[in-house]
Image: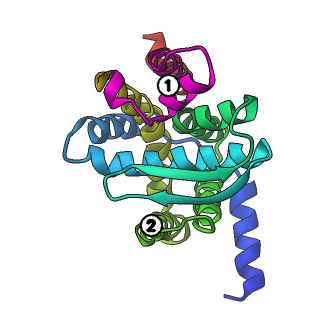
């Protein structure tokens, strides 16, 4: 296949609509995502994906508010850090710090809207674009391997897998982001004030007059709201029962 054919196929897939899957398939992927988020054996892998989106949220907002992005690091304990230069205080810094925990639910909600419009392939290719963009800024070997592994898996399914597998993956990504977004905040809440030291809410508390626990609660409520809207978008019949 020539480069022109590749570009043509990519453009067709990104701009085209696919038939909406059966409601039972959507619900089954939601149940699978819930199990993956709930089980202790699978949660670390899911959390690593959430961390990728978390750090991407920091990075994107840092650039949007005029900060100079220096790099992103992903660690094997599923944590991450995004470094940027700019004013140490002000609305831009607050927005950048708050973006991390809000990004998974925000991206999950955007994914749900794309899927409701029949654009599952567009969602998968946008995910690949996000991973490639973040790869430019990753500054450690483990982070590079994680992004390459995630990206290669999505490309393989998007390029070679049958439509059913593509639809399952696209819905699974949306469900995982929506369902997993609140859990890191719940874990952070359970650590207490000492356990939150150095975290995003702790840094936000230093910049504002709101305690870190209030920031945790506000972001948790925002993520839960995103989950409710996302469920209503992906499975509208579920909330009507």
Position of 137 compared to 143: left or right?
Answer: right
> Is the N terminus in the top left, top right, bottom left or bottom right quadrant?
bottom right
Looking at the rendering, the stretch of residues picked out in magenta corresponds to: 193-220
- Image coordinates of residue 72 in percent, x first then y, are 55, 58
Q: CA distance from mark 2 to mark 1?
A: 25 Å
Q: Nearer the viewer, residue 81 or 44?
A: 81
Residue farthest to the top, as pictured: 241
> Is the C terminus in the top left, top right, bottom left or bottom right quadrant?
top left
Q: Which residue is mark 1?
A: 227
Residue located 74% across and 46% down the image: 86
Secondary structure of residue under mark 2: helix
Q: How many labels, in total?
A: 2
Residue 53 drawn above or below residue 91:
below
- Image coordinates of residue 125 in percent, x first then y, are 62, 60
Which of the 4 quarters of the picture holds residue 92? top right
**Can residue 120 be seen at all in this image of the molecule?**
no
Numbered tag placed on residue 140 in the rendering: none
Residue 38 drawn above or below residue 61:
above
Numbered tag placed on residue 153 in the rendering: 2
**Can residue 215 be seen at all in this image of the molecule?**
yes
Residue 121 drawn above or below residue 65:
below
Q: Residues within 10 Å of mark 2 (few under 14, many from 20)?
A: few
Q: Residues within 10 Å of mark 1 (few under 14, many from 20)?
A: many
Secondary structure of residue under mark 1: helix
- Image coordinates of residue 154 in percent, x first then y, are 49, 63
Q: Does the stretch in magenta take in 207? A: yes
Q: Does the stretch in magenta take in 155? A: no
């Amino acid at each position: 296949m020539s480069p022109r054919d590749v570009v043509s196929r990519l453009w067709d897939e990104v701009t085209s609509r696919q038939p909406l899957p059966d409601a039972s398939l959507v619900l089954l992927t939601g149940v699978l995502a819930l199990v993956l988020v709930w089980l202790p054996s699978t949660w670390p892998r899911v959390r690593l994906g959430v961390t990728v989106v978390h750090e991407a949220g920091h990075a994107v907002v840092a650039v949007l508010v005029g900060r100079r992005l220096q790099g992103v690091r992903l660690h094997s304990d599923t944590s991450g850090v995004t470094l940027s230069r700019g004013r140490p205080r002000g609305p831009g810094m607050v927005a950048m710090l708050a973006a991390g925990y809000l990004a998974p639910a925000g991206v999950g909600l955007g994914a749900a809207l794309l899927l409701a419009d029949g654009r599952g392939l567009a969602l998968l290719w946008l995910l690949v674009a996000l991973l490639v963009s973040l790869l430019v800024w990753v500054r450690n070997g483990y982070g590079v391997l994680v992004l390459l592994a995630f990206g290669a898996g999505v490309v393989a399914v998007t390029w070679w897998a049958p439509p059913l597998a593509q639809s399952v993956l696209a819905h699974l990504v949306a469900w995982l982001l929506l369902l997993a977004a609140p859990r890191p905040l719940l874990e952070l809440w359970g650590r207490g004030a000492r356990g939150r030291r150095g975290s995003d809410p702790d840094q936000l508390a230093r910049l504002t007059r709101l305690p870190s626990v209030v920031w945790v609660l506000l972001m948790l409520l925002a993520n839960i709201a995103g989950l409710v809207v996302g469920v209503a978008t992906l499975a509208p019949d579920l909330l009507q029962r």
